Amino acid sequence: MSTSDHTPNEPVDILIVEDNPGDVRLMQEAFGMTDSDVRFRTVSDGAEAAEYFRRCRTGAVDGYPDVILLDLNLPKKSGHALLELLGNEWEHPTPPVLVLSSSTADDDIHKSYDRNANAYLVKPDSPTEFDSLAKAIESFWIDRVQHPPSPA
């Protein structure tokens, strides 16, 4: 999707890389409250995410994420390792990667930006805060930011 052409009826593909099913559910419900038609793909560990990214690069995945929501503390491969993988191996412009972590550690924040995360967001504590975050992501990353077109 090129967000320059985005309308509220245009589907948006969001990849959620998160091992906590409760957080996945809260994110999905929060985006359900927005005006965007969101399609979710969810992977629950770092190895599964790395495989998904590989399949995207080779064209083996139907669709391509418009936005990636990435937890840092994942089983099998960390979010930091995935950011590094995306930076080193993605052959076309990377979709926006928004780190969504419970960590407020300066080291995690610095490492994320050093590995080209587009934003670092602290996970909300309540459903209402998830709703606000989803609306903010929609307003900026879906409705305003200009993305390069997805590869053919």
Image (cartoon, helix red, strand yellow):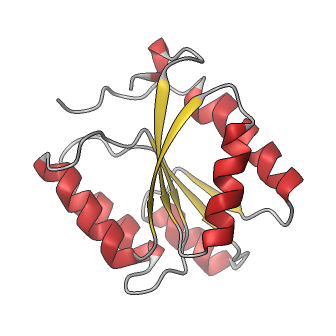
**Residue 100: image x %, image y %?**
62, 62
**Residue 7: image x %, image y %?**
55, 14
- 133 left or right of 138 in image: right
Relative to 140, is 71 above or below? below
Relative to 26, is 48 above or below? below
Relative to 1, is 15 above or below? below
Foreground residue among 41 and 3: 41
Foreground residue among 142 and 146: 142
Residue at image x 70%, y 79%? 105
Residue at image x 45%, y 86%? 75
Residue at image x 22%, y 50%? 56
Foreground residue among 11 and 101: 11
**Residue 54: image x %, image y %?**
19, 60
Residue at image x 82%, y 44%? 132
**Residue 1: image x %, image y %?**
38, 26
Which residue of the protein is positioned furthest toward the bottom in this rendering?
A: 76
Q: Quadrant of the C terminus?
A: top left
Q: Quadrant of residue 148?
A: top left
